[in-house]
């Protein structure tokens, strides 16, 4: 008796089980090949992918997710604690002992990408909005402010409980408050640049990619004054003039990109020009190699941003624009796209609470004594390896905290005026304590 064999084409592969049965092979095995088991993650990823609008720019969301993840990764990897004789925790950094780790900060300093993508997304939102510009800004700023108000109000309530109830040393609470408020400066700056979106759109339509050039020039002038031959005669507050143009630079590039005024030629110029300027500033002009502040160092690149930060942002922006299409195609895979969606939905929770997650592990450990990689001087290779091992715990604690804290990102429709006022008072009190004003 002749057997019937179907050709193995794309259209007939799904009939492999039937073909195998006709040929006398084991149908159970064939069924296992034809219908592989699908796990919970694969099902969830497929569902997220199916619900994603076809016009969604996955590359932009992916770039934002990378920049978001770089923030906790950098703070967890390059931040440590020493323990004083009274059991209090104090900030420390492995960069003080391992200057060779500075290139790691070049990778993890992705705020330039965050501002680039923020500018791009803002101009698209601004173009689609209906109603007044003031209403658009109010909605954008409220989404930024709610999580900040939430984390600072919660910590204001925790401080007396931790100190008087659990005996946590006051210096530990000072350290913790500094760490919690540390990433929130970014939200303040981002709020200001968001408010400038209408002006950035006008500049982009008139000057295109070159609209960001005056901002670069402004930072270069201030850096020349504070680090050049006249440095001794320049007041220290002059460096604060770099804060707005320093972070607005990448945002303006993003707005110009969203307006369609940044071409691949511009992107190559940003990549190559930014990389060349970055190298020149390091080799010939003596800029610190680390992109983050190092305890004990007189100069810092990030607070406020120096010209080196803008050079890195330019190079990163050029690379992001050039790789956008390829990155977008990669994120067509549901297994890669699903985490991007989750991260973007929890953006402000990650920014506001990742330091709290690390503190939730370090403060209890301080009662035990020195714990390598968690509490103790970050001055050995063993500490670095141990810190890498602790990072999954920090991530798990952040996920746990985020289950409850993410509600701060949603509109406070059920929160009355009295509770909002109380949250504001608590947040203000925490800020005063964290900034050392009380």
Image: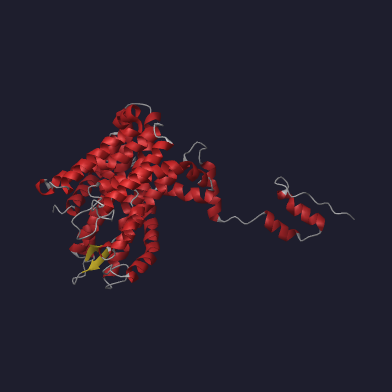
Q: Is 117 rendered above or below residue 352? A: above
Q: Position of residue 146 (x, y in %)?
A: 30, 44
Foreground residue among 300 and 17: 300
Foreground residue among 169 and 26: 26
Left or right placement of residue 351 versus residue 178 in this view: right
Q: Where is residue 31 in the image (x, y as percent from the top left)?
A: 71, 56
Q: Can residue 311 be seen in this view?
A: yes
Q: Can residue 345 be seen in this view?
A: no
Q: Which residue lies furthest to the right in this view?
A: 1
Q: Residue at x 36, y 51 (%)?
A: 350
How has the structure been colored for display? Answer: secondary structure
Q: Is 265 rendered above or below residue 93? A: above
Instruction: Give the quadrant of the N terminus.
Output: bottom right
Q: Where is residue 345 in the image (x, y as percent from the top left)?
A: 41, 46
Left or right placement of residue 117 versus residue 432 in this view: right
Q: Where is residue 255 in the image (x, y as percent from the top left)?
A: 35, 35
Left or right placement of residue 435 versus residue 233 in this view: right
Instruction: Give the quadrant of the C terminus.
Output: bottom left
Give the mark count.
0
Q: Residue at x 27, y 52 (%)?
A: 282
Q: In which quarter of the image is residue 416?
A: top left
Q: Which residue lies furthest to the left in this view?
A: 233
């Amino acid at each position: 008796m002749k057997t019937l064999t179907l050709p193995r084409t794309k259209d007939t592969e799904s009939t492999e089980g039937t073909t195998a049965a006709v040929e006398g092979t084991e149908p159970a095995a064939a069924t296992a090949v034809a219908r592989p088991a699908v796990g919970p993650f694969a099902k969830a990823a497929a569902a997220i992918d199916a619900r994603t609008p076809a016009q969604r720019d996955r590359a932009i969301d992916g770039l934002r997710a990378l920049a978001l993840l770089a923030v906790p990764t950098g703070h967890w990897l390059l931040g440590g604690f020493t323990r004083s004789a009274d059991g209090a925790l104090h900030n420390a950094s492995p960069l003080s002992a391992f200057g060779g780790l500075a290139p790691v900060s070049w990778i993890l300093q992705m705020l330039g990408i965050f501002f680039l993508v923020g500018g791009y997304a803002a101009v698209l939102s601004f173009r689609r909005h209906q109603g007044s510009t003031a209403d658009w800004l109010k909605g954008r700023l409220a989404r930024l402010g709610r999580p900040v108000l939430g984390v600072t109000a919660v910590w204001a309530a925790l401080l007396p409980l931790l100190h008087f109830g659990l005996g946590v040393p006051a210096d530990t609470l000072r350290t913790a408050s500094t760490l919690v408020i540390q990433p929130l400066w970014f939200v303040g700056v981002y709020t200001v640049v968001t408010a400038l979106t209408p002006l950035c759109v006008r500049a982009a339509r008139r000057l295109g990619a070159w609209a960001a050039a005056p901002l670069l020039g402004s930072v270069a002038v201030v850096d020349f004054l504070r680090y050049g031959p006249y440095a001794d005669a320049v007041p220290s507050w002059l460096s604060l003039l770099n804060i707005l143009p320093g972070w607005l630079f990448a945002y303006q590039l993003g707005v110009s990109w969203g307006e369609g005024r940044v071409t691949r030629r511009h992107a190559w110029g940003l990549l190559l020009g930014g990389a060349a300027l970055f190298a020149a500033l390091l080799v010939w002009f003596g800029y610190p190699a680390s992109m983050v502040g190092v305890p004990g160092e007189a100069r810092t690149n990030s607070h406020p941003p120096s010209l080196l930060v803008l050079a890195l942002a330019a190079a990163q922006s050029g690379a992001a624009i050039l790789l956008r299409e390829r990155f977008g195609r990669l994120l067509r895979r549901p297994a890669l796209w699903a985490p991007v969606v989750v991260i973007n939905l929890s953006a402000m929770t990650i920014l506001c609470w990742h330091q709290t997650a690390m503190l939730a592990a370090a403060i209890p450990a301080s009662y035990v004594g020195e714990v390598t990689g968690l509490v103790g001087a970050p001055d050995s290779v063993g500490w670095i390896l141990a810190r890498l091992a602790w990072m999954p715990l920090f991530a798990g604690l952040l996920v746990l905290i985020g289950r409850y804290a993410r509600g701060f990102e949603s509109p406070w429709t059920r929160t009355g005026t009295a509770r909002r006022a109380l949250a504001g008072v608590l947040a203000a009190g925490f800020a005063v304590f964290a900034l050392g004003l009380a």
